[in-house]
Image (tube, rainbow, N blue to C red):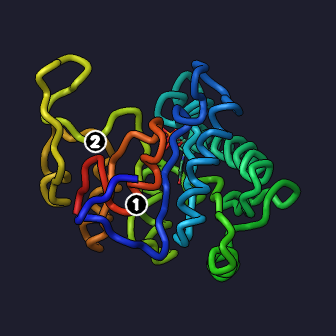
Amino acid sequence: MADDSSSQTYNRVLLKLSGEQLSGKYDSGIDAEFGAWLAAEIKKVVDSGTQVVIMVGGGNYARGAQLAGHGIRRVTADHIGMLATMMNALALTDIFESCDIPTRCLSNIFAEQVAEPFVHRLANNHLKKGRVVIVAGGIGRPYLTTDTAAVSLALELDCELVMKATKVDGVYDRDPAKYPDAAKIAHLSLQAAVSDDNIKVMDKAALGLAMEHQLPIIIFNSTEPDNILNAAHGRGGTTIN
Ligand code: UDP
């Protein structure tokens, strides 16, 4: 682990994992082998004494905005998207438990045969006992993404940091895939992230909600060893606060 004077210790963090992250080496679905690698990385955060809430996306199966049309209503498409997040959350819960991480899956979609309903008090109790809480179904309402749901959930559960896992190591001034000389931005204000149209790393709705409540966000590459632990201490990536 890098020793960095900017290191912070957080009591509770929220990790946003997209569906694309969970698909790993595949084009869609779940890469369970990569999921187990992620679980081992997240265990380092749990073992360091930080409580972890996870919001999972569903883009490896369905995204409402893309699915809507040709007769499928947007609300229905978003319901399908939320059900996609549930499939990921269930798989991830099993993977975490197989890696000896005490975990509970709580759902914001009514699905009592497969997951406990999300109840604020229950989630808090699980977290205080050191269990990872994986939330399925976003926040249960359409016209939102799991980025916005992640910020909302982080506020609800008093998380001190939102960690958005990506495949790039932060925010760049230009698309690094297109421009080899693109420069990484180490720090950005929430205000700048909301108002700059070139910043597309997170929904504006999510950034706006974080700005209103001064909730810091870290954008980082979760696919390198120790990066999740480092991000949970405010190191690496791009900090938006
Ligand atoms: N979704 C929703 N309400 C929520 C969270 C998610 O309607 O609170 C739907 C929405 O259609 C979204 C889909 O679920 O596109 C999957 O989530 P997302 O696109 O955020 O997944 P990711 O891109 O992070 O994998």
Q: Amino acid at mark 2?
A: Gly
Residue at 63% of width from left, 74% of height from top?
127
Quarter-of-image position of residue 84? top right
Q: How many marks?
A: 2
**Is 221 in front, or is 138?**
221
Question: Residue 151's spot in the image, x, y percent?
Answer: 42, 62
User: Dot 2 surroundings within 10 Å: few (below 14), some, or many (20 or more)?
Assistant: many
Disc on res. 162: 1
Question: Residue 114's spot in the image, x, y percent?
Answer: 84, 54
Residue at 43% of width from left, 44% of height from top?
165
Question: Residue 163's spot in the image, x, y percent?
Answer: 41, 55
Residue at 58% of width from left, 39% of height from top?
58
Rendered view: 185 above or below 152 = above
* Residue labelled with disc 2: 170
Mark 2 CB near ligand 1 (8 Å cut): no
User: Dot 1 surroundings within 10 Å: few (below 14), some, or many (20 or more)?
Assistant: many
- The answer to whether residue 78 shows anywhere in this view is yes
Element carrying mark 2:
loop
Q: In the visual, does 42 lie left or right of 172?
A: right
Q: CA distance from mark 1 to mark 2?
A: 14 Å
**Is 51 in front, or is 227?**
227
Q: Amino acid at mark 1?
A: Val
Q: In the visual, does 12 lie left or right of 30?
A: left
